[in-house]
Amino acid sequence: MSPWKIKEDIIFIGVRHWDRRLFDELIPLPDGTSYNSYLVLGTEKVALIDTADPSRREEFFRQLEQTGAKRIDYVISNHAEQDHSGLIPDVLEAFPEAKVVTNEKNKGFLMDLLRIPGDRFMVVADGEEISLGEKTLKFIFTPWVHWPETMVTYLKEDKILFTCDFFGSHLATSDLFADEGTVYESAKRYYAEIMMPFRGVIARNIEKIRAYDFDIIAPSHGPLYKNPEFIIKAYEDWISDRVEKVVLVPYVSMHGSTRVMVEYFVGYLMGKGVKVIPFNLAVTDIGKLAIELVDAAAVVLGSPTVLTGLHPSAVYALYLLNALRPKTRFLSIIGSYGWGGKAVDVAKSLLGNLKAELLEPVLIKGYPTEEAFGKLKKLADNIISRFDTL
Ligand code: FEO
């Protein structure tokens, strides 16, 4: 496809990866993704903002060629991760006069990750500007969204903020600008999987960029926003301390005992009018769980005991929970064991990052009895009473 003009002399190079289904061999991509870069044609200099994933080299250079650009003076690198930087060496080879413009930290990453020679860089400071003629690029450091070197680039005259991963979405779409109804879940999924562990610094970075006047947010994944408030407000909500009275129940069951416990527990909560979402970890899209973790106040893990510990799928879920650092206020564990075990100790050892309160677990021997159901009822009532205090 041909590149699009966002405004006069600002060209969108949007490399869609329609059929990519996994990122970092970890993150599910049900709707594919895109790697966006931007060509800014100044009267004196030409800048390319970010590149694309090396797996899409051909498509990237096809679109770049279609812009008709005969020179590139600056390659702006907002972030070192290879889905945006991976083609910088190819661009430098194609345009030998080009310099990579970025911060000192990012320079180090790019030299390590891509073996770009040090003399190809122009290092900029936070707030520094470069002139392209009648257009000016200003670099605003926004560290830890989601790597330490991340920054955004502000095109002053045209009021566009190029944010790379910040405000991005893994969504391959033919739309240049976001359809807000469509993009919301993809953007939330992206936030949950990539940004959620950095809530505190994201808040500070949003405050920092709010000092600038911009009409368009142009991320390097997914569509652009011509109503920046839509995505900024969504982020402000996700990073806030607000939680929803929702109980998430990620679970796995080997022979059915834990499943019966989960179904009883979920049914009881539903009967009390509480929103509850079970996720069978054997088949669930882990991204769906991550999306719900953004707001949910409670998580109750269901797991059988395997070799005295938790089922490996439950370990994986807890590892993610701990890594993503959601706002979860209350946690517990339910499940069945055969000959005893240390499921709760294992779970505690995996959750060091979370500040959530651990509510009395319900671990029972064998198939659940009326006594087990009574304990599950007690746990559910405990959660409901905690919800009343929120
Ligand atoms: Fe889209 Fe952190 O790379």
Image (cartoon, rainbow, N blue to C red):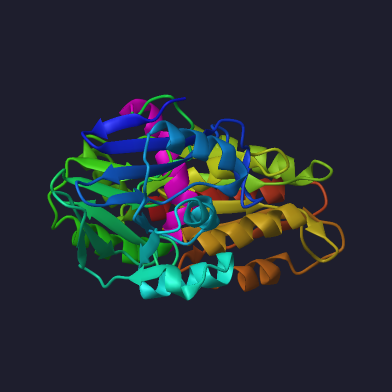
- Position of 52 with respect to 77 (left or right) is right
Q: Residue at coordinates 61% horizontally, 37% vertically from top-left?
A: 20
Q: Position of residue 284 (x, y in %)?
A: 65, 39
Q: Quadrant of residue 211?
A: bottom left
Q: Can residue 75 be spotted in the picture?
A: yes
Q: Is residue 242 magenta?
A: no
Q: Can residue 382 be spotted in the picture?
A: no
Q: 170 or 317, which lies in front? A: 170
Q: Position of residue 383 (x, y in %)?
A: 47, 52
Q: Residue at coordinates 41% horizontally, 37% vertically from top-left?
A: 13
By secondary structure, the bulk of the magenta-drawn segment is best described as helix
Q: 351 or 28, which lies in front? A: 28
Q: Position of residue 320 (x, y in %)?
A: 59, 58
Give the magenta range: 179-197
- Position of 61 with respect to 309 (left or right) is left
Q: Quadrant of residue 245?
A: top left
Quadrant containing the C terminus in the rendered view: bottom left
